[in-house]
Image (spheres, helix red, strand yellow):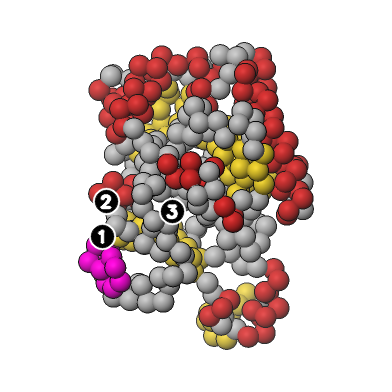
Amino acid sequence: MADTKKRSLDSDNGTESGPEKKLATGDGDGKDAKQPVADPGSEAGSMLAGFQTEKIMRESSREKNIFIHGKMGSGPNEGQDAVLILEKTPFREDSLAELFKTSELKHQMRNDIYSTYHMHPPAHLNDIKATVVCPATEKHIKKYQSQELFLIQESGEDYRNITLPYIQEQSFSVQWVYNILEKKAEADRIVFEDPDPQNGFVLLPDFKWDQKQLDDLYLIAICHQREIKSLRDLTQEHLPLLQNIQQQGQEAIMKRYSVPSCRLRVYLHYQPSYYHLHVHFTVLGYEAPGCGVERAHLLSDVIQNLQTDTQHYRTRTLTYPLRADDALLHKLREAGRF
C-alpha cells in the first residue's frame, strides 16, 4: 500500500491545481511506469504499526478527515517519510438496522426533548479509509498542508505565454493514465469503455468512492486521445468526443448503478489535477472536492460554448484557485499577472 494512490483527494480548502496531482482515479504525482503496482491487500496487516507522527498538516471536522505527515515504522518503507490520510467512510443505509441493534450507547446529556449519546458501533461498521503516500517527497508534504488560496484570472494570452510554457517545462508524467488506457493497471476497475481512438474513453470509479453506497458516487472518464491537455485545448472538432463521453458515460452509469442523468453532475476541472483530458461524474447532493464554481465547468455548458464559438476556451479568461506554494502562482507573479 506504499504506493496507494491519493487520486484527487482535494478538499475545498486545499485545492490542488496543476500538474503534481493525479486523478480521482489517479491523483498521485506522475507515477513512473517502472514502479510496480502494489497489491492493495498484500501489505495490509500491521503496516501502520509504529507510524511516527511528525505533524498534523490539515484536518476537517466537516469532511471527517485528517492529513498527517510522519514516518513509516515498519515494513519495506520503514523510516521513510509518508503522508497518511484518514477519512471516515459514509454511513450505509443497508447497515443501519445492524448499527442500531449492535452499537453500545452511553448517555451524555438530556434537555427537554433533546438527548445526546456516544455511540460505539462494532468494528466492521466503523470503518476508516486510510490512504498512504510513501515515500513522500517534499512536494507531497507541501501539497497536503493547509494553505491560503488565491483566485487567479487567466486570460488566453496568459495561458499561452505563462501557463502553457510552465506545463511544458515541468514535463509532468501521466504515464499512470496511459497504464489505465493500455490495461496495464486497474483494468478490473473499468466500468465501461469505448475503444474508439478519437472519440472513445474509459470510465472507472474515482478512488474517493468506496462503491458501497450511491450517496457519494464518483466516476472519471479518461479520453483515449492523448494530445488534449485540458479545457484550453478544446475546439469544435472535439464536440463528438465530448458528446460521446456525456451520452455513453451517463448511459453506463444508469445501466450499472441505476442513477439517471438528471441526478448526475458532469464536469471538467480547470486547472485540472493532471494534464490529460478527463471528465468527472458525481451524484447530485454529494459535495465532491473541486465541484465548486471556482474550478468546475459543467460538460453541458462546455459543449454549448464550443458550439457557439470554436475558440471559446482558447481566448476567454478563466478563473481558478491556486495554493500559496503553487509554482504556477509564482510564475504569474513574476510576470506581473498577480
Can the viewer see residue 23?
no
* Quarter of the image where the C terminus is located: top left
Which circle's residue, 1 or 3, is located before the other in the chain? 3
Question: Quick check: 127 above or below 335?
Answer: below
Look at mark 1 in the image and give the residue it sits on.
81
10 Å crowding of disc 2: few (<14), some (14-19), many (20+) = some
Q: Earlier in the sequence, mark 3 or mark 2?
A: 3
* Left or right: 289, with 14 as reference point: right
Q: Would you identify the image quadrant in which residue 114 lies?
A: bottom right
Report the amino acid beneath label 3: Lys
Residue where numbered disc 2 is placed: 137
Can residue 103 be seen in the rendering of this structure? Answer: yes
Pinpoint residue 89: horizontal percent, then vertical percent: 54, 65
Tell which of 264 and 114 is nearer to you: 264
Q: Give SS at disc 3.
A: loop
Whether 105 is drawn above or below 131: the answer is below
Residue 96's quadrant in the figure? bottom right
Residue position for label 3: 6
Q: What's the CA distance linking mark 3 and mark 2?
A: 14 Å
Question: Callout 1: helix, strand or loop?
Answer: strand
